[in-house]
Image (cartoon, rainbow, N blue to C red):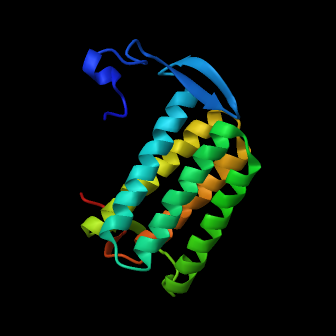
Amino acid sequence: MLAKPCLMLFSCPGDGGDTVVYWKGVARQAKKDDAVVKLFGALDTAVAYAHKAANVLPRPQGRIMRLIAFSLMELGFYLATGRAEYLDTAHALYRRALKLAYAIAPEEPLRSWIACASPECSAVDEARVWIRWAERRVVTLEEAAAAKLLNQLSNLAFEVMRTLPHIKYHHRDVR
């Protein structure tokens, strides 16, 4: 049985460019280019890329990215429902991931830009970029707690990148 039987009729809700979106426990009709819809799209993409990175990484980096993905999911639940317990869980998952990242962090300070030199590092970078994109979207909705958590999660993904093969890039004059 299909989850969406409307596929058989070639007519599903949302085909006209609108949808129902939940924001802080309130359902409302919205165009698909609405700020809340765009935020959830960016958040959904960030979750997918965080899971993708987790699937190609060894432990403990893979575990960190999986925890980041789950934290993003819980944050989405919070934004949709407004229930603080989801935000608390998102923070708890972030703290668990942070503990793992701290344990594997390189000793030397960062003194250059990082350019990924492996598919695994690039997968983490893709997730980081989408987390940043979701952060920018949530800022437009003036949701400070979510913006702060997204900023921390993207920074955490960057720390994972530091543990993977990368090129330390320094500017050089090419003339």
- Residue 97 is situated, as x and y percent measured from the top left of the image, at 56, 71
Q: Residue furthest top?
A: 16
Lateral position of residue 15 relative to residue 143, left or right: left
The answer to whether residue 114 is above or below residue 130 is below
Q: Residue furthest right?
A: 84
Whether residue 172 is visible? no
Residue at the image position 27 percent from the left and 16 percent from the top = 10
Q: Nearer the viewer, residue 145 or 4?
A: 4
Residue at the image position 33 percent from the left and 25 percent from the top = 5
- Residue 48 is situated, as x and y percent measured from the top left of the image, at 39, 51
- Residue 98 is situated, as x and y percent measured from the top left of the image, at 59, 73
The answer to whether residue 103 is above or below residue 41 is below
Q: Residue furthest bottom?
A: 107
Residue at the image position 54 percent from the left and 79 percent from the top = 100
- Residue 118 is situated, as x and y percent measured from the top left of the image, at 26, 69
Lateral position of residue 70 relative to residue 87, left or right: left
- Image quarter where the C terminus lies is bottom left
- Please tell me in which quadrant of the rendered image residue 126 appears: bottom left
Residue at the image position 40 percent from the left and 72 percent from the top = 62
- Please tell me in which quadrant of the rendered image residue 137 appears: top right
- Please tell me in which quadrant of the rendered image residue 7 appears: top left
Q: Nearer the viewer, residue 46 or 23?
A: 23
- Image quarter where the N terminus lies is top left
Please tell me how many numbered marks the rendered image carries. Answer: 0
Whether residue 132 is visible? yes
